[in-house]
Amino acid sequence: MNGTIAKAACIGGGVIGAGWVARLILHGVDVDVHDPSPDAERVVAEVLANARRSMPRLLDASLPVPGRLRFAASIADAVAGAGLVQESVPERLELKRAVLTAIDAAAPVDAIIGSSTSGLLPSDLQQGMAHPERLVVAHPYNPVYLLPLVELVGGQATTPDSLTRAQAIYTALGMKPVTIRREIEAFVGDRLLEALWREALWLVHDGIASVTEIDDVIRYSFGLRWAQMGLFQTYRIAGGEAGMRHFLHQFGPALKWPWTRLMDVPDLDEALVARIADQSDEQAAGLSVRELERIRDDNLVAIMRALAAQQGGRGWGAGELLRQQEAAMRSDTQAEPLRLLSGTVPTEWIDYNGHMTEHRYLEVFGNTTDALLAQIGVDAGYVASGRSYYTVETHIMHLGEARQGAPYDTTTQILHADDKRLHVFHQIRNSDTGAILASAEQMLLHVDARAQKAVAAAPDLIARVAALAQAHAHMPRPPAMGRHVGQRPG
Ligand SMILES: NC(=O)C1=CN([C@@H]2O[C@H](COP(=O)(O)OP(=O)(O)OC[C@H]3O[C@@H](n4cnc5c(N)ncnc54)[C@H](O)[C@@H]3O)[C@@H](O)[C@H]2O)C=CC1
Ligand SMILES: C[N+](C)(C)CC(=O)CC(=O)[O-]
């Protein structure tokens, strides 16, 4: 089933709602957001900026044309024409029921309604809905725009068809839907996380370890294992040649020793809250939430890209999913210019004229060329072998103004390619308006860096470049192609 949707509505634009907005928009879906908070537009813009920064670094494929973003004054206005309505309001049953009833009354009857709840039962959420059959819990993980998992949970009234359609919709958004077999509070992921979280709170409460020490224990050991194999497969290996059976027999009895305080929750009194909050402040060392988010995002991108490079490039786990997503994106976009980068114009790029200063255009075009080279296979290993592409000529035309905070994306048309030459035409567009801000025509030469001369590229690379050039051969040539400085228009 093809789960592609043109428009979605996000009801609630906080931490999770904004993450959904970013994932949807960067997958080409138009989004209407409804959130009564005066901070909502700022929060969504900031989270979207972080997503725009990290998504192109994650994928070796061009992202689709971003969807457009609109803030709606009411739930009814937001959900009109939506194929998916994602509810992400605070975790209070009565509030969620009221919001879901309002969504249900106004959304198209075939729209899927996904609730981001991290623990409430879908059957409880369905109370009062006229069409409860299309409600599913769709529980994501933060940051929603990077982490692929979405737990799908149906309630008593949810139909199998709705679960199947929800699976298809979230899959088309590059996610990994896992349908939970029976509804239970907190589903699967949060049950596991909260067991660890309770134990960790006790360790701080009892003065056994600090917040930083506990985080170090996790991130230098089993945190790394979990990212690539989860729990059971990791323990299977830990059982040695005798495997899982041996592991269970050896370590199973220890589970009954009275180590754990898992069933108790420490009283989160002011003293314990202050201890944890103070230690956490010290650990953050003055970094803001947005700065920490960017560090987290860069680390997640690096981990997922490392997983994508495994198994001879087929990828493993979350990395294999990334490879599948890239393949789907390439087949969607091959007959169009490649979409290689997107971002937001930062304050430090603005000059005394109040718009993006000229050398930043070359930076964006240079980064676009790097993204193109990465896509065709010029990676660190290729460059280390002494071969690379050098840019030998660039002609930039400035066509519009890029103001601070403006979202932009870049496109690339391959004009010509042979075994040594790569002739490309890049454009920078304003992602909101579609206006072309600048173009750059570039000629690149494939070189042997040690011999300092142009040589033929590796055969697999030539094949990839040729396939792109062939796909682009039928596209109209850009009117600015071959233009020189001082030429009369037309
Ligand atoms: N924060 C997290 O790590 C995760 C949270 N979740 C779930 O996502 C949901 C939202 O949580 P967060 O984003 O963390 O909360 P949040 O507090 O950051 O955002 C909630 C947003 O809902 C808005 N809101 C309140 N009433 C509304 C209404 N009547 N209509 C529209 N918007 C309304 C608020 O203004 C706020 O912006 C919860 O159900 C939570 O359990 C799921 C996964 C992870
Ligand atoms: C804290 N939380 C229970 C809301 C967390 C989640 O639901 C998932 C996550 O992102 O860890």
Image (cartoon, rainbow, N blue to C red):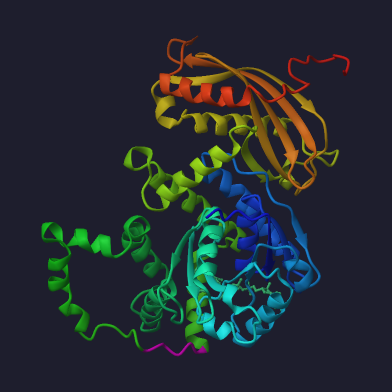
Q: Whole-percent x and y of residue 22?
A: 63, 56
User: Is 396 rendered above or below residue 400?
Assistant: above
Q: Is the magenta stretch mostly helix, strand or loop?
A: loop
Tell me the magenta residue range. 264-269
Q: Whole-percent x and y of residue 34?
A: 74, 69
Task: Kindly indicate the quadrant of the structure image that contains residue 8.
Answer: bottom right
User: Is 219 rendered above or below residue 474?
Assistant: below
> Dividing the image into 4 quarters, which one contains the C terminus?
top right
Residue drawn at 35 percent across, 43 percent down = 310
Q: Whole-percent x and y of residue 315?
A: 38, 45
**Is 162 left or right of 264, judged from the image as shown?**
right
**Is 208 left or right of 424, judged from the image as shown?**
left
Q: Whole-percent x and y of residue 198?
A: 40, 80
Please name whichever residue, 254 or 411, is drawn nearer the observer in this view of the structure. 411
Task: Kindly indicate the quadrant of the structure image that contains residue 309.
Answer: top left
Please name whichever residue, 425 or 57, is drawn nearer the observer in this view of the structure. 425
User: Is 37 rendered above or below residue 43?
Assistant: below
Q: Is residue 208 magenta?
A: no
**Is 363 left or right of 232, judged from the image as shown?**
right
Picture mark count: 0
Please name whichever residue, 474 or 407, is drawn nearer the observer in this view of the structure. 474
Q: Is residue 281 visible?
A: no
Q: Can residue 459 be seen in this view?
A: yes
Residue drawn at 41 percent across, 44 percent down = 308
Task: Kindly indicate the quadrant of the structure image that contains residue 458.
Answer: top left
